[in-house]
Image (tube, helix red, strand yellow):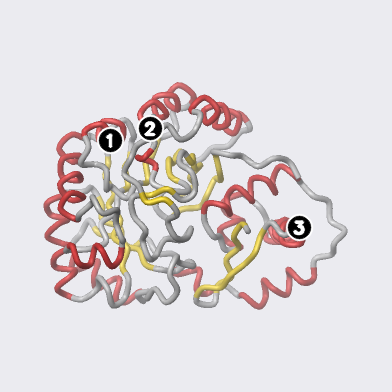
């Protein structure tokens, strides 16, 4: 199998950013938080120290090579295996991307380091910044997000407010709702008050459809999400992909079992698929739309990678998700 990409992955299908070509600039899983709902697992290094984690020139060369193959994503998204603002060369990376392409740049961040002027200056070079706010008070913040000891919710909110004052681009604030932790009326009222201070362009509600770092993370149903969205206001939308819960698991498994072992391996596509699965669990539908594959073709690649021990699977609410081993 051809060597997979180290720093660039996808394109990944996203309800927020449509087709997003990901750029990963921190090691797995270096983060300022250890969120109970994280889809890529527990934080291994909890830190607030910015470092030059990866060779910037190699990242840009890999991105340029990807784009020269004819990829046309809607966004180049700096995200991946941890908190991207921990990379001290984030601003240089965005400058480098601008020299390669005019595709819009998004930064997917938890927002916890935006209290720092240097982090705000780096993020302000992007077109869209997508931070998070999952709690209305310190106690809930610690339960849901499990932050580094030097981060508190007021520091997070103050950083987001300061960034709003300085940033002319778009801020799309994600609120990840966990049933029983941040979904009662009091908590939603507190979150709404913080949102009014931050003044994002959009508020986007999410909940646990995919496998999460901790077992038993409660998912909200569509009706409750709609009620909360209405309470928060007109700039609030729901981004959870509820279509995943209707996937036909048994049919997909039957097709997987029926694939013969005699198919030809397409190394480049398998490498791209494996890079994608290292960053997030994906359903069969995700893989098809992200890589532009037909259902049967995607199943062939998945099956071959499973047979080689590269890929495993897990189930969340009746949907099968594939992930790198």
**Quadrant the N terminus occupies:** top right
* Element under disc 1: helix
Q: Are marks 2 and 1 in contact (CB under 8 Å)?
A: yes
Q: Nearer the viewer, residue 22 or 284?
A: 22
**Label 3 vs 2, first from the N-terminus:** 2
- Residue 151 in percent (x, y) is at 23, 51
Q: Which mark is residue 171?
A: none
The residue located at (52%, 28%) in the rendering is: 60
Q: Nearer the viewer, residue 100 or 58?
A: 58
**Label 1 vs 3, first from the N-terminus:** 1
Would you call the spot at circle 2 few (<14 residues within 10 Å), some (14-19), or many (20 or more)? Answer: many
Would you call the spot at circle 3 few (<14 residues within 10 Å), some (14-19), or many (20 or more)? Answer: few
Q: Which residue is mark 1?
A: 119
**Quadrant the C terminus occupies:** bottom right
The residue located at (42%, 31%) in the rendering is: 52
Quote the CA–CA distance across marks 3 and 2: 35 Å
- Residue 164 in percent (x, y) is at 18, 41
Q: Which residue is mark 2?
A: 90
* Element under disc 2: helix
Quote the CA–CA distance across marks 2 and 1: 8 Å
In the rendered view, would you say 123 is above or below 19? Answer: above
The residue located at (55%, 28%) in the rendering is: 58
Q: Are marks 1 and 3 in contact (CB under 8 Å)?
A: no
- Residue 222 in percent (x, y) is at 35, 74
- Residue with the most extreme right position: 262
Q: Which residue is mark 3?
A: 308
């Amino acid at each position: 199998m051809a060597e997979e990409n180290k720093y660039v992955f996808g394109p990944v299908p996203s309800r927020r950013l449509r087709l997003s070509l990901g750029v990963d600039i921190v090691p797995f899983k270096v983060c300022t938080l250890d969120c109970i709902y994280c889809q890529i697992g527990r934080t291994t290094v909890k830190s607030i120290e910015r470092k030059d984690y990866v060779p910037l020139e190699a990242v840009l060369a890999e991105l340029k090579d990807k784009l020269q193959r004819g990829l046309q994503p809607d966004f180049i998204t700096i995200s991946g295996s941890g908190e991207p603002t921990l990379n001290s060369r984030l601003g240089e990376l965005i400058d480098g991307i601008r020299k390669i392409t005019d595709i819009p740049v998004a930064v997917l961040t938890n927002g916890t380091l935006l209290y720092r002027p240097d982090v705000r200056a780096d993020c302000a070079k992007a077109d869209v910044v997508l931070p998070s706010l999952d709690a209305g008070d310190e106690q809930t913040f610690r339960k849901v997000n499990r932050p580094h000891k030097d981060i508190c919710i007021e520091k997070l909110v103050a950083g987001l407010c300061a960034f709003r004052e300085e940033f002319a681009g778009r801020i799309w604030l994600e609120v990840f709702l966990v049933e029983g932790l941040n979904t009662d009326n009091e908590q939603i009222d507190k979150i709404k008050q913080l949102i009014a201070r931050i003044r994002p362009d959009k508020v986007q509600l999410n909940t646990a459809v995919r496998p999460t770092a901790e077992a038993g993370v409660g998912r909200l149903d569509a009706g409750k999400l709609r009620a909360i969205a209405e309470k928060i206001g007109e700039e609030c939308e729901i981004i959870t992909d509820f279509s995943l819960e209707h996937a036909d698991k048994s049919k997909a498994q039957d097709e997987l079992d029926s694939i013969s072992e005699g198919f030809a391996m397409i190394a480049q596509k398998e490498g791209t698929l494996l890079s994608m699965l290292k960053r997030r669990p994906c359903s069969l539908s995700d893989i098809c739309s992200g890589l532009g594959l037909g259902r049967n073709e995607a199943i062939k690649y998945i099956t071959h990678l499973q047979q080689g021990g590269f890929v495993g699977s897990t189930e969340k609410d009746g949907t099968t998700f594939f992930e790198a081993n």
